[in-house]
Image: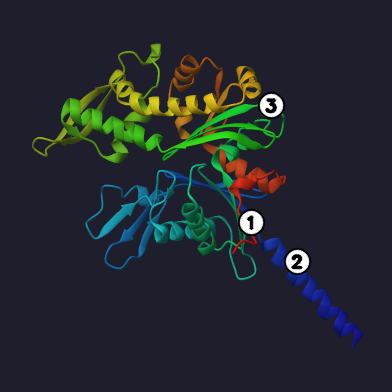
Amino acid sequence: MSTARSNFMAGLSALFSLFSTSVKDIGIDLGTANTLVYVRGRGIVLREPSVVAVDEHTDEVLAVGKQAKEMLGRTPESITAVRPLKDGVIADFEVTAAMLKYFVRKSISVGTFSRPHIVICIPSGVTEVERRAVEDAAKQAGAGRVDLILEPMAAALGAGLPVDKPKGCMVLDIGGGTSEVAVISYGDPIVAESVRVAGDRFDEAIAAYIRKKHGVILGERTAEEVKLQIGSAYPLENMQDVTMDVRGRSAANGQPVTITVAADDVREAMLQPLKSVFEAIHRVLVQTPPELSADLLETGITLTGGGALLRGLDRFLHEATGLPVRVAENPLDCVAEGAGRTLEGGAYIPANARRDREEV
């Protein structure tokens, strides 16, 4: 009997060990434009567009991520390719939950006994309702436990800033839907601001400018491509006289047309949204305590997110603020890496970004 009991207990121990090793901790940068998934011990394992293709008649999800993005602007009326997040927050809960479930299951195996701990990043300006929507979507995706971390805090962690030191450092994270600005010291954002002006607004501004100047309507993907190819925030020598041939639709007669767009025009088109981003930085600087302001003369501003790759943005902000500005080493990965660091090393998650788990 003792031998049988011993064997049973050994088997039970092995079973629990199997379950415990199958549980994965993951960090998610749930972005308006792209979603990145970080798995503890493996790093970033997934980078996909935050796009879902849905059958309008059956509500069936037909494609997610890269495959769905290829459908944007190219589907029949019965199929809609949508981005379920807008301005950094959930605009379509059911589609977001389905997308998250797909990304989580593509990254790790999820089962009855292996529901992962998920750390998910949120803009600093979200409402309580928007926070709950993110938590609920993560739980529907299979999470056993959900923690939230502010995007600027995650970006600073991922960029390697000394956020736990008694010294002020500033981060500007420009994603697809929001730009997050924060001054951080002693492990907490001292001053933070979130503006819903970022990469998507740059694209919209380019499309609006070209329609007004040339009478040509551009698709969402085409406007983004113009930004990536010839966009800049500051007049750069190597961008002078640079042009790009762009295909669109004539607003006058609906015919397909090709026009030539100059880099100078693209920069002018983006000037207003860039000013909005600078104004957010200015508001944060005005509210920053004098001691931390003095630190910023040394530590400057660190740029993260896809918007950090916009040519000349560092020079634009340096001239506007007088502070040193640098682009993080891997700006696209910083938010996801920061979420991962909270898993790998038990890094501090700001209390104001995480709800008390005992709250009803």
Q: Nearer the viewer, mark 1 or mark 2?
A: 1
Q: CA distance from mark 3 to mark 2?
A: 43 Å
Query: What residue is shown at x 49% (from left), y 59% (from top)?
Result: 137
Mark 3 / mark 1, whichever is N-terminal: 3
Find disc 2 in the rendering and name its residue: 17
Q: Which residue is mark 1?
A: 356
Residue under the point 65% across and 69% down? 113
- Graded by Cα atoms within 10 Å as few (under 14), some (14 to 19) or many (20 or more), the crowding at tag 3 reads some
Q: Secondary structure at mark 2?
A: helix
Q: Secondary structure at mark 3?
A: loop
Q: Between marks 1 and 2, how big is the CA–CA gap?
A: 29 Å
Q: Earlier in the sequence, mark 3 or mark 2?
A: 2
Decide: few, some or many residues near mark 2? Use Cα within 10 Å; few <14, some 14-19, many ≥20. few
Task: Kindly report which numbered mark, 3 or 2, lies closer to the viewer in this rendering.
Answer: 3
| Residue at image coords 34%, 26% | 272
- Observer-nearest of 211 and 332: 211
Label whose residue precedes the other's in the sequence (1 or 2): 2
Residue 349 lies, in percent from the top left, at 65, 45
**x%, y% of residue 44?**
58, 45
Instruction: State the image coordinates of residue 353 (x, y, percent, origin top left).
Output: 59, 47
Whether residue 27 is visible: yes
Measured as percent of width and height from the top left, residue 358 is found at 65, 62
Residue corresponding to mark 3? 167
**Is there any visible trace of residue 43 in the rendered image?**
no
